[in-house]
């Protein structure tokens, strides 16, 4: 009887530990599979700690971290056989906890290194887990991954501003299709998606993405989840975003015009001349003072 009670207690204790362990105490693990030619890169990835990504507010409650993420390093010949466009440096299959990376390729925007590609794809897997595998609009998924991957940079702002000028008719719906329309269209879609999600966070707080993901995970549509998180319909959010960015369309053409650029160059040249003359003046005054002090001593 005591043996049975002991076994029951042990089983109860294991169950308590498994289901009451704080999410923050769980760790995210990567497993790497790679051919011999990528052994050095594989070693670097095995040494990479992805857990700081969980500090992102809308990923802090992600469940199912016990399942490792498999990172597979793929040769160029294998990528071509599978028809992967040559500008794609990696992708994630979230439902299988799988990331494929192509180390021989130069990453394109929004990534600038293989490590940033890795962070971006890990973010996709975590976002998929947060949504319990339920579908999300591509622009929202990509925009979230960009914000998890790295801070908003000057390059992001410039790309976004230029994209709004050359492709100002882009809507939420059209964004989802642009990612599969070639490198240029995809880069523009990334720029808009990143700006959209950052705008969402700025206006409605860092908890907004978490509310959207949890509502979608509960079985509601993305439109309904957006309404819950922001109190606004998706249509009104799109209209608000496009109207708020109109200032970019008014000013960027002027700022990038030939007249403005030449004016800036001229101004910089005049400032350089003035600075040079000021330095000469100060140097001459110092020499005069030193010479006067020398004669005073005599």
Image (tube, grey):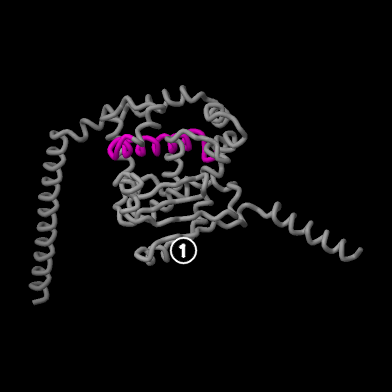
Q: Is residue 202 magenta?
A: yes
Q: Main secondary structure of the magenta part?
A: helix
Q: Position of residue 172 (x, y in %)?
A: 41, 28
Q: Is 80 in front, or is 279?
A: 80
Question: Residue drawn 34% across and 54% down?
Answer: 113
Q: Which residues are magenta?
A: 181-207
Dot 1, crowdedness within 10 Å: few (<14), some or many (≥20)? few
Q: Position of residue 4 (x, y in %)?
A: 87, 62
| Residue 101 horizontal side relative to residue 63, left or right | left
Furthest-bottom residue in this view: 298
Above or below: residue 254 compared with residue 127: above
Question: Residue drawn 56% across and 32% down?
Answer: 229
Q: Position of residue 217 (x, y in %)?
A: 59, 37
Q: Is 218 in front, or is 208?
A: 218
| Residue 264 horizontal side relative to residue 194, left or right | left
Question: Residue drawn 29% across and 33% down?
Answer: 163
Q: Is residue 154 visible?
A: no
The residue where tag 1 is placed is: 46
Furthest-front residue in this view: 81
Task: Name the quadrant containing residue 228.
Answer: top right
Instruction: Look at the numbered disc 1 and give the secondary structure of its residue.
Output: helix
Q: Is residue 220 visible?
A: yes
Q: Is residue 40 magenta?
A: no
Q: Position of residue 248 (x, y in %)?
A: 30, 31
| Residue 241 horizontal side relative to residue 14, left or right | left
Task: Name the quadrant containing residue 218.
Answer: top right
Q: Quadrant of the N terminus?
A: bottom right
């Amino acid at each position: 009887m005591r043996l049975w009670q002991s076994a029951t207690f042990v089983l109860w204790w294991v169950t308590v530990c498994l289901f009451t362990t704080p999410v923050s105490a769980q760790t995210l693990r990567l497993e790497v599979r790679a051919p011999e030619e990528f052994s050095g890169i594989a070693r670097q990835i095995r040494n990479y700690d992805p857990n700081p990504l969980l500090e992102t507010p809308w990923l802090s409650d992600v469940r199912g971290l016990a399942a490792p993420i498999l990172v597979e390093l793929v040769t160029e010949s294998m990528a071509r056989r599978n028809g992967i466009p040559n500008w794609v440096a990696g992708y994630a299959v979230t439902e299988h906890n799988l990331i494929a990376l192509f180390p021989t390729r130069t990453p394109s925007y929004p990534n600038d290194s293989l490590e940033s590609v890795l962070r971006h794809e890990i973010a996709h897997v975590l976002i998929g887990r947060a949504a319990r595998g339920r579908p999300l609009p591509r622009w929202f998924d990509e925009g979230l991954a960009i914000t998890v991957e790295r801070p908003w940079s000057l390059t992001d702002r410039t790309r976004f501003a230029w994209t709004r000028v050359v492709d100002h008719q882009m809507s939420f719906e059209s964004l989802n299709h642009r990612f599969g329309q070639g490198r240029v269209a995809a880069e523009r879609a990334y720029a808009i998606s990143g700006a959209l999600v950052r705008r969402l966070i700025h206006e409605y707080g860092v908890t907004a993405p978490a509310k959207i993901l949890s509502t979608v995970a509960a079985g509601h549509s993305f439109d309904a989840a957006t309404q819950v998180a922001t109190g606004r319909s998706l249509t009104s959010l799109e209209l608000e975003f496009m109207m708020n960015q109109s200032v970019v369309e008014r000013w960027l053409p002027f700022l990038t015009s030939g007249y403005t650029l030449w004016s800036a160059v001229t101004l910089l040249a005049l400032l350089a001349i003035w600075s040079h003359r000021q330095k000469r003046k100060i140097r001459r005054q110092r020499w005069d003072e030193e010479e006067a002090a020398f004669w005073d001593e005599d």
